[in-house]
Image (cartoon, grey):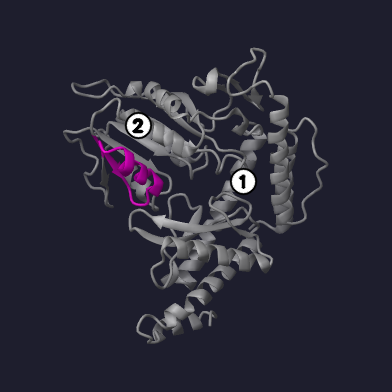
């Protein structure tokens, strides 16, 4: 359990790390509340971006000045017209063991990264099966269905059995950090030698997560070509949402020898870079967090992600005990958010409005919660959520980095608010009858 005092001390160190990146640091007072933390963090990162633009005024899109030497903290850049050949020198957002080599291609967002990788794969294989686990990111599936007809989506049921066995057509496994709990572990227990390519979206795992290392090790043992795709505007900027940045990291050094008819996946990095160029999806140097990469950065990132995971487990247990009938998915692989369902089926508009109403009302009560479409913040963030597996809508509650006592109180208030605003639908479902057993269940828990 982390006290409010210990939390504010830790947040002061985060703010100092950000502030030290300024050439002219702000006069920084110790935060006295969560709102102080959030406000100061976004003010400092705004100052960092502004200072970058003022200092790097020669580093324009057209690279007109040969005296420009663009950089952002530990990251150094070289590029020509519109960053089509962007080269980045700087720290990795991952911790890969010494037996691997890697090439990183940075993009303007996580979706830009995975779009380029998937489009590039079509240059290597004419047709392929792309295997997906329950809970895969909905927009990735929408992208494949809408623009990549030669990639046939094959949903994988759990348990997997022999679902990864070799077949006649090329097979790509799309492993997603937002899958349901247990899905990734189920893959790691299988023989993966029948796979041709593994695309691992690591966005919801910390860059130095043990699960990323286990997946990399599994791919190595089975000789599978591997690319890690990621949005860095989540867990990699200390909750400050510094800038839109994504990457595709091609891990090499373990691929099995080519067999007759095998695709040349060694070309994937080249084809991906070409796709980024043609799509205009290259990263902006100004979006690289200048405070990343140091020992202090990694230590603070580790502590804040650990706090989010602890809070996530706590809220999942609470909702499962107190509002089980209104809990949608509480056990994602990443543990960063939970989802709540309506008594009657929600559509996107209804879920969005519920997220907005709940955030506004609880915020007026003094809780650190906002309607925001992301996660990893120092405040709880609510938004509508679409489950691509079930085609159902719910409200997502993204778990924040907050002191234990504050988050426990907010969790109870979210449950009480959600039950109160679903009560009419529970008590008087279609047809007008009162569902007495459900009403008694919640009344006994103090939500009457």
Which residue bears the numbered disc 1? 239
Query: CB under 8 Å between callouts 1 and 2?
Result: no
Q: Residue at x 75, y 38 (%)?
A: 19
Indicate the position of residue 298 as horizontal and vertical percent values.
Answer: 61, 37
Q: Is residue 155 above or below residue 105?
A: below
In the image, the segment drawn in magenta is: 128-151
Q: Is residue 20 visible?
A: yes
Q: Is residue 331 left or right of residue 418?
A: left
Which residue bears the numbered disc 2? 119
Magenta highlight on residue 155:
no
Q: Is residue 59 left or right of residue 36?
A: left
- Residue 300, by quadrant, is top right
Q: Nearer the viewer, mark 1 or mark 2?
A: 2
- Residue 360, by quadrant, is bottom right
Which residue is nearer to you in this view: 188 or 251? 251
Question: Mark 2 or mark 1, which is nearer the start of the sequence?
Answer: 2
Asked which secondary structure carries label 1, the reply is loop
The residue sitting at the left extreme is 168
Q: Is residue 395 above or below residue 37?
A: below
């Amino acid at each position: 359990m982390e006290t409010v005092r210990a939390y504010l001390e830790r947040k002061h160190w985060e703010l100092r790390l950000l502030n030290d990146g300024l050439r002219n640091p702000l006069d920084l007072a110790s935060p006295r509340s969560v709102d102080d933390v959030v406000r100061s963090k976004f003010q400092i990162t705004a100052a960092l971006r502004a200072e970058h633009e003022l200092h790097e005024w020669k580093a324009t899109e057209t690279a007109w000045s040969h005296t420009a030497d663009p950089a952002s903290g530990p990251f150094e850049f070289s590029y020509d017209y519109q960053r089509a050949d962007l080269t980045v020198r700087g720290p990795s957002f991952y911790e890969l063991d010494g037996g691997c080599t890697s090439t990183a291609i940075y993009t303007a967002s996580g979706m830009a990264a995975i779009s380029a990788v998937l489009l590039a794969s079509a240059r290597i294989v004419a047709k392929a099966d792309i295997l997906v686990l329950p809970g895969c990111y909905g927009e990735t599936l929408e992208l494949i269905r809408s623009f990549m007809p030669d990639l046939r989506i094959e949903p994988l049921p759990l348990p997997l059995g022999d679902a990864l066995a070799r077949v006649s057509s090329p097979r790509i496994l799309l492993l997603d950090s937002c899958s349901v709990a247990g899905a990734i572990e189920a893959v790691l227990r299988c023989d993966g030698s029948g796979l041709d390519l593994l695309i691992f979206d690591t966005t919801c795992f910390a860059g130095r997560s043990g699960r990323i290392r286990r997946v990399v090790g599994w791919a190595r043992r089975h000789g599978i070509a591997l690319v890690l795709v990621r949005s860095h505007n989540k867990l990699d900027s200390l909750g400050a949402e510094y800038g839109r940045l994504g990457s595709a990291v091609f891990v090499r050094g373990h691929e099995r020898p080519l067999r007759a008819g095998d695709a040349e996946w060694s070309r994937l990095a080249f084809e991906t870079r070409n796709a980024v160029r043609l799509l205009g999806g290259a990263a902006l140097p100004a979006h690289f967090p200048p405070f990343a990469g140091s020992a202090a950065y990694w230590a603070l990132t580790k502590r804040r992600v650990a706090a989010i995971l602890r809070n996530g487990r706590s809220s999942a247990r609470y909702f499962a005990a107190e509002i089980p009938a209104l809990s949608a998915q509480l056990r994602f692989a990443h543990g960063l958010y939970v989802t709540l369902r309506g008594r009657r089926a929600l559509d996107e508009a209804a879920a969005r409005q519920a997220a907005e109403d709940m955030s506004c009302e609880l915020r007026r009560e003094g809780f650190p919660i906002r309607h925001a479409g992301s996660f990893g913040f120092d405040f709880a963030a609510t938004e509508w959520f679409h489950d691509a597996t079930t085609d159902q809508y719910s409200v997502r509650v993204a778990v924040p980095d907050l002191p234990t006592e504050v988050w426990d109180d907010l969790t109870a208030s979210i449950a009480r608010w959600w039950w109160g605003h679903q009560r009419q639908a529970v008590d008087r479902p279609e047809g007008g009858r009162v569902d007495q057993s459900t009403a008694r269940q919640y009344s006994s828990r103090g939500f009457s």
